[in-house]
Amino acid sequence: ANKPISVAVTGAAGQISYSLLFRIASGALFGLDQPVSLRLIEVDPALRALEGVAMELDDCAFPLLDSIEMTSDLKVGFDGVNWAILVGAMPRKAGMERGDLLGINGKIFGPQGAAIAAHGASDVKVFVVGNPCNTNSMIARDAAKDLPADRFFAMTRLDQNRAKSQLAKKAGVAVTEVSNVAIWGNHSATQFPDFLNARISGRPVVDVIEDHDWLHGDFITTVQKRGAAIIDARGASSAASAASAAIDSIKSIITPTPEGDCVSLVVPSRGEYGIEEGLQFGFPIRSDGTSWRVVEGFDLDDFAKSKIAITTNELIAERQEIKAILANS
Ligand code: NAI
């Protein structure tokens, strides 16, 4: 049998993890011949609830689940892990300024990045879900100087999946017909879901969907504001779909990207498309199963460029704010 892959998940007692952990343990992420060890990390007040989650994982009798460790100690939690999935974050509460949120999360993701670099396996990779996920992944990356920057990812896949589903519905086709959907920039309401380079059954979306006002208008805002729409309807934020997107994301990093397609991931910019180097930025990516690269040659017209400028500026502002906050603390 294969040696277990060791996976740390923070925020393990939260609602995304309540879906994510069961899918990882079932083999949905690493495959049906790959055992997994889970290292579940929570803050102390949530450790009791976490015990309940672990009891349920036991009760599934998953053949591939090798072991479960529960801890609030980062050194123990990240010890020897091959993947660190950072889901836990401080949610934005009513009346909270973005600066407050960035500051609190800076103090979570810095120490986590440092602990991953110090204690993780030599091949450790880091995938950030907790918001603001681009900037949180940048904080973790900066605190983990010993690790190559290309090991740090954050999640725009939920946005990609949302965009794909909206395009398929509008065109009246199956989601499997929609390819090459890129999400540019920040995982926030400023993101740019790219319909210009997307394809339906291999043809440009703009040739298949005739309602270009919809593409430039409601399509974009529906994807940008989908998170808020779900909170309005469900009374709680996206959880199962976020977990599903996290599974899709990590799978897309460790599996070659299908020919002619791309996947949306937040990665460190090396200056592609003129995006400032070092920002953790949502790009179209191709993976060969071990390494990844930003897909070059996407056509961006003035409309796309202006949208990408907005989301880039937001990320630059977040970076400035967090630098100032961390420097003063
Ligand atoms: P939740 O509030 O149900 O769970 C978060 C858990 O994290 C809680 O159990 C909390 O105790 C824990 N936690 C907080 N600080 C921690 C720390 N320092 N170390 C370890 N655990 C810690 O939240 P939910 O719904 O599971 O969402 C988690 C995060 O994912 C949120 O930040 C949310 O905004 C984000 N999210 C990101 C999406 C994306 O597309 N990138 C989509 C949906 C949610």
Image (tube, rainbow, N blue to C red):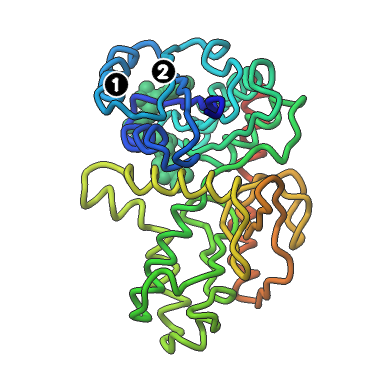
In the depicted view, which residue is nearer to us: 41 or 57? 57
Taking the image in four quarters, ligand 1 sits in the one at: top left
Residue 217 lies left or right of residue 76; in this view the side is left
In the depicted view, which residue is nearer to us: 282 or 295? 295
Residue 294 lies left or right of residue 55; in this view the side is right
Q: In the rendering, which numbered label is found on residue 112?
A: none
Which corner quadrant of the image does residue 298 belong to?
bottom right
- Badge 2 local density, few (<14 within 10 Å), some, or many (20+)? some
Looking at the picture, how far across and down is residue 188, in whole percent?
48, 51
**Secondary structure beneath disc 1?**
helix
Rendered view: 126 above or below 245: above
Q: Quick check: is the Cβ at mark 2 less than 8 Å away from ligand 1? A: no
Q: Is residue 92 visible?
A: no
Question: Would you name the residue on which mark 1 appears?
Answer: 58
Residue extending furthest front?
1
In the depicted view, which residue is nearer to us: 66 or 132? 66
Rendered view: 8 above or below 214: above
Q: Residues at badges 1 and 2 in contact (C-beta under 8 Å)? A: yes
- Badge 1 local density, few (<14 within 10 Å), some, or many (20+)? few
